[in-house]
Image (tube, rainbow, N blue to C red):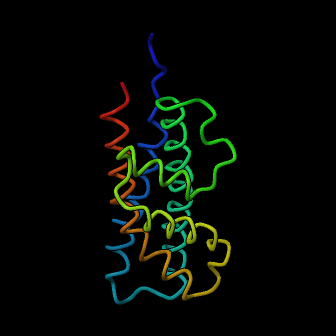
């Protein structure tokens, strides 16, 4: 019996886009002549990349788990349940940090709050590493 393979191209593109946004932001924000408006726009771009990359990450976790464990296993499951299964299957390594990413994703609509925006922007760097880990885990086990 052959299993369906996941088309990981959209996740690869999202992770690459987040990486480019973070690299661009790091270079531009190192410039002391940058205005507050420019800083906010650059950070907003990183936060937007965080949002859609996070969304794709959890959806691909769910798809992989359902394809490889049991269809419908996670129907109606909470994000915490999804992350627990993903840790058990070694798709991700840290349950707590993924719960934190979920909480941050839920606060992205409040990025007009400077402290919230700064926290999400700062965590985007950490998230990139975990998104890359997930992507590599999926690539290796997508057979």
Q: Is residue 87 left or right of residue 107?
A: left
Q: Quadrant of residue 81?
A: bottom right
Residue 136 location, x and y as percent? 31, 43
Classify 6 as above or below 126: above
Residue sitting at 47 percent across and 62 percent down?
98
Residue sitting at 67 percent across and 41 percent down?
75
> Residue lying farthest top?
1
Closer-to-camera residue (29/117)? 117
Residue 129 location, x and y as percent? 33, 60
Classify 109 as above or below 88: below
Residue 1 location, x and y as percent? 45, 10
Q: Quadrant of the C terminus?
A: top left
Closer-to-camera residue (126/10)? 126
Residue 113 location, x and y as percent? 62, 86
Residue sitting at 38 percent across and 52 percent down?
92
Closer-to-camera residue (10/85)? 85
Classify 58 as above or below 27: above
Residue sitting at 36 percent across and 75 percent down?
28
Q: How many marks?
A: 0
């Amino acid at each position: 019996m052959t299993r369906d393979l996941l088309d990981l191209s959209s996740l690869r593109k999202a992770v690459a886009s987040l990486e480019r946004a973070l690299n661009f932001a790091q270079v531009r924000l190192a410039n002391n002549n940058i205005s507050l408006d420019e800083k906010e726009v650059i950070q907003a771009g990183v936060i937007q990349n965080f949002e859609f990359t996070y969304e794709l990450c959890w959806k691909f976790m769910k798809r992989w788990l359902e394809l490889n464990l049991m269809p419908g296993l996670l129907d109606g499951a909470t994000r915490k349940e999804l992350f627990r299964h993903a840790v058990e299957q070694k798709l991700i390594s840290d349950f707590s940090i993924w719960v934190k990413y979920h909480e941050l994703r839920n606060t992205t609509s409040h990025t007009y709050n400077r402290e919230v925006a700064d926290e999400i922007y700062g965590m985007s760097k950490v998230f990139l590493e975990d998104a890359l880990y997930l992507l590599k885990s999926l690539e290796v086990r997508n057979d």
